[in-house]
Image (cartoon, rainbow, N blue to C red):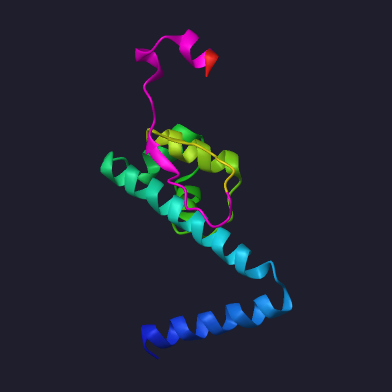
Amino acid sequence: MSDHDDIDFLDEVIRERSDKNPAFSAMVDAAYTRRVLLRKITEARKAAKLTRTAVAARMGTSEAAIARLETAAVDPKASTIERFAAAVGKQIYWELVDGSNEVEFVREAPDLRQTDPAQHARE
């Protein structure tokens, strides 16, 4: 079976399940978005030359837990994703948007030590 056949089969399964449950397609999209986000955080970890063990220590968890996050073997809580991003020097910005819009989830975390704390209180 080629990759193209796999995609066709997956599309067919999604269509069939969506016919039975109109929310299914949105759930698939949300799962895909989470995987992309976790992949971006993983790329940030590697770019920062941090090991899974180092990130685990920063988060107070195990290397195996980080591996599960990076391979999307779990459906993590939002707070876990935020801690994972912070451990690699990133910050998550959650934004409620129309379901048809794509949002860039990961960017450099601002260095709050270099700014006026009163400014952040006003934001």
Is 60 drawn above or below residue 102 in the view shown?
above
Most foreground residue, 122 or 7: 122
Q: x%, y% of residue 107?
A: 38, 38
Q: Position of residue 44 (x, y in %)?
A: 33, 43
In the rendered image of this protein, does residue 57 appear above or below residue 39?
Answer: above
Q: Quadrant of residue 15?
A: bottom right
**Horizontally, is 95 left or right of 2 in the view?**
right
Q: Is residue 103 visible?
A: yes
- 13 relative to 50 in the view: left or right: right
Is 97 placed above or below 109 here? Answer: below
45 vs 8, nearest the viewer: 8
Q: Find residue 117 and report its horizontal and vertical position in percent.
A: 46, 10
For the N terminus, which image quadrant?
Answer: bottom left
Q: Is 67 placed left or right of 98 in the picture?
A: left
> Which residues lie in the magenta part?
98-121
State whether residue 61 appears in this view: no
Specify whether residue 40 is painted magenta: no
Does the stretch in magenta take in 118? yes
**Viewer-side residue, 123 vs 74:** 123
Question: Could you tell me residue 72's position as x and y percent?
Answer: 49, 58
Which residue is found at the position 50% from the left and 37% from the top? Answer: 93
Residue located at (50% from left, 49% from top): 65
Furthest-bottom residue in this view: 1
> Which residue lies most toward the right here?
20
**Tag count in the figure?**
0
